[in-house]
Image: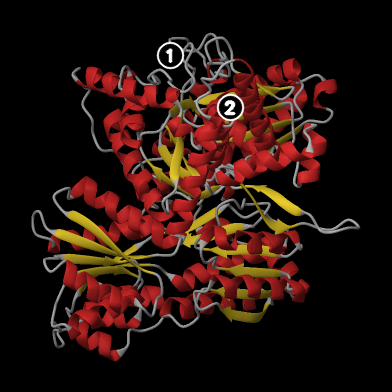
Amino acid sequence: MRSEARSTGAKREGVARRLGPGRGIGGRVRRIDAERSSLTAILNLVRLGAAKTRHEIEVTSGLGRAVVANRLGSLIALGLVDEDEIGQASGGRAPRLVRFRSDTALVLVGALDPTSLSVGISDLSGRLLNEHHEAFELGAGPAATLERLETLFDWLLDQHRHDREVWHVTLAVPGPGRRAEGERFAWPAPHFLPAWNDYPLVEQLMLRRRVPVQISSSVQMKALGELRAGSAVGQRDAIFVDLNREISAAIFSEGRLHRGTDGAAGLIGHTSCDDDGALVCRCGNVGCLELFAGADAIAREGTRAAVDGRSRYLAEALASNGEIVVSDIGIAAQLGDPVSAELLSRAGRLVGTVLAGLVNAFNPSVIVLSGAVAQTGDIFLAAVREAVYRRSHPLVTRDLRIVRSQMASSAGLVGSAIAAIDAIFEPSFIESWINLGSPLRHPTTERLIASAGGAATKTAGRPRPPDKAGNGRS
Amino acid sequence: MAIAGLGPHGERAAPPERLELSDADAARAREKQFTAAVVFHTTTSDWSTQALAGIVTTLGRYSAAVVEVVDCQFSIENQTRALERIVGERPDAIISIPIGNTAVADAHRNVSRAGIKLVVMDNGPTGLLPGTDYASVISADNFGLGKVGAELLAPFIPPRGTAVVLGYGVDFFASNEREIAFRQWMAANRPDITVKTVKFSEVDRVSPVVEKLIDAEPDLDGMFAVWDVPAMQAIATLRARNRSLPITTIDLGNEAATELAAGGMIKGIGAQRPFDLGAAVATATVAALLDHQPPPWVALPALAVTRKNVIEAYQVVWHAPAPPALIKAGRGGATRR
């Protein structure tokens, strides 16, 4: 195994020497650029499954047989593809299958929600090799969150690394994820909670792992996961709704995610449902959807029903657990508690009414409901469906499906892995690292990691908000 | 005890009461005379015996026949082959404990693709989805069990002492969750304790791992073994070397329970209720066969067992009176070292 690794390393160096850093002049530069471009094209054809044999690569890419043979030799030497399997014959000799080696490197992914934390490890196809989810209060603060993430990342690597490089870390957070101007990977510090302002989370992660780190919006990553591996596979027009303490949506229109100017599109939890209401939302407005249909809002109403004797089921849950969470209300509703059923039904109708506006505007083929509120069961789902179908124009609901997510929190991890891999293999980026054998040796990556050191040290001197360990109840 | 962990996809746990079938459903099930096969990681442990009893008893109540029980002997290959073969024999349902996570994902996915209902115990292989690839995951609260293991071991570890996790070197959701939870509890509540890990890959090859550990770490203060069978092998190895170590583990097997009751090396156990787990998985299977959608993750809480409550806990876990040896040991019998 070791000698094989040394041999692959030597081959990689050979390819790198031949393609070089591209400092030649005239025709040599053009030849090297063309060689890199065709390498990238072939790699992405194989990686995305568009071509599976040499012949298919030739036909799809328009490149000649000799060029394809040469580039495949380079990609095999770099450890990015192999030709070890034989395909099915169609008359003549059975062709060798060209396969992307998705096990060449790894991607670490994490997802933060207000009451839970998820981590996963993926290969370069976006397939999760392992995942773990646990209750966690984001209110514990950024330092405690970072420590927990790092512990769990270490644990995943202990299980799966086997001498492979990690090429990327993506973290999905409950807030907008917006790329800094002119930067490929450096994202601004997340500021979804006041205590997180200016905390050098990205820089700390980069310094520790020595890889690019990307921060992305949690709801957008979950939507991407559902589109690639869940209930919205193959759909181009889809709405994903995350229903937890907060309510937000991600909208795919004609295959593209609508991010908005500030990367904050989809804050439907702040759509007004009751302009005259007395409850004030954390956004400063009154009557926001979250105040009635968010997980905490429903739990608060359930607690009232338990305390004032309207619900025997919820009173028992409160006595047993010390608190009521939205899943308790789902269980009580399933067991026949009319108060809980009505709470979920009302929340579902409000969510459905807000979604009807989006359905009229975007005409999606599927709406995927996810999060703790969606997981309560069929009563909530039925109420959402009823309101959407009743309040939308018949033309836009003719082919509309409204489903509950099967992936749950896994969707955020899968979406994060896909986003990381899309960034690594983006044609303009891959062209500048493919000759080096790894994106970690790309000058941008090295510069980012070097600058992360300075930023983390500079910010480390600022006073920190107090941290506390936190463990939420399921 | 509340459920501490989250499900394979981050789901909140549903209690087994959510699986109750109506009288009309029960009558419909009896009329259909369903068949089910059971594919276990092992059938020889006390846990497996109890879980199987729960499955068979409950399926029998709904006139469903268990047509085959497979012991995979902890082998991924055995499980893959068994599932392929059983799919060809077309039972109505398969109940399985997946071994090795993604390594057996395709074999399990093919069960539901063949139109056979699949209900999994302990974990759903990464990448498989509830509703599409399996009906439900029924498990103990493995995260809660790991926390119990830590909480019961902590009093026996001196300040700045060292504890070791005797972990399973195969990617297995249940033992992974226990190990993560043990470490999390120690980090949060006893950060002075150094936690190390050693792993065994084969259940009958624990002794060499423990031998090596004793030589490398002579100053260990305690051990957490991720289930009772390796815990008892570790104890045998320690005794042979004339060593003693406070140990906590998971599952109230007969030997572990007696060791605990007798004041031996085992100081505490996080117990599952395998019979009740078996009953829940059988009910979920019947529900799925009747085209109901059971909750994606049903979990039973952990039970903290110490020398003080071991006899009562035994009765709860085993649905049977404690054996005389256990009662004798627990009520003032000889204390073992």
The residue lying furthest to the right in this view is A91
Compared across the picture, whether A355 is left or right of B182 comes to right
Q: Looking at this view, is A244 or B70 the one in front?
A: B70
Q: Which tag is nearer the camera, tag 2 or tag 1?
A: 2
Residue for point 16% across, 66% down: B217
Q: Give x and y (percent) for residue A317.
A: 42, 47
Q: Which amino acid type corresponds to the residue marked 1 in the rendered image?
A: Val
Seen in the image, is B272 located left or right of residue B307?
Answer: right
Q: Is residue A344 or residue A156 the one in the foreground?
A: A156
Q: Residue at x 35, y 26 (%)?
A: A449
Q: Tell me residue A415's x, y (percent).
A: 57, 35
Residue B275: where, in percent of width, then height?
47, 73
For label 1, the crowd category at 10 Å Cα-Cα, with few meaning under 14, some 14 to 19 and many 20 or more, is few
Q: Residue A431: which numbered mark, if any? A: 2
Badges 2 and 1, same chain? yes
Residue most extreme to the left: B159
Q: Is residue B51 above or below residue B219?
A: below
Instruction: Give the labeled residue for mark 1.
Output: A280
- Disc on the earlier residue, 2 or 1: 1
Q: Residue furthest bottom?
A: B324
**What colour-coding does the image apply?**
secondary structure
Q: Which of the 4 image quarters holds residue B111?
A: bottom right
- Residue toward you, B179 or B280: B179
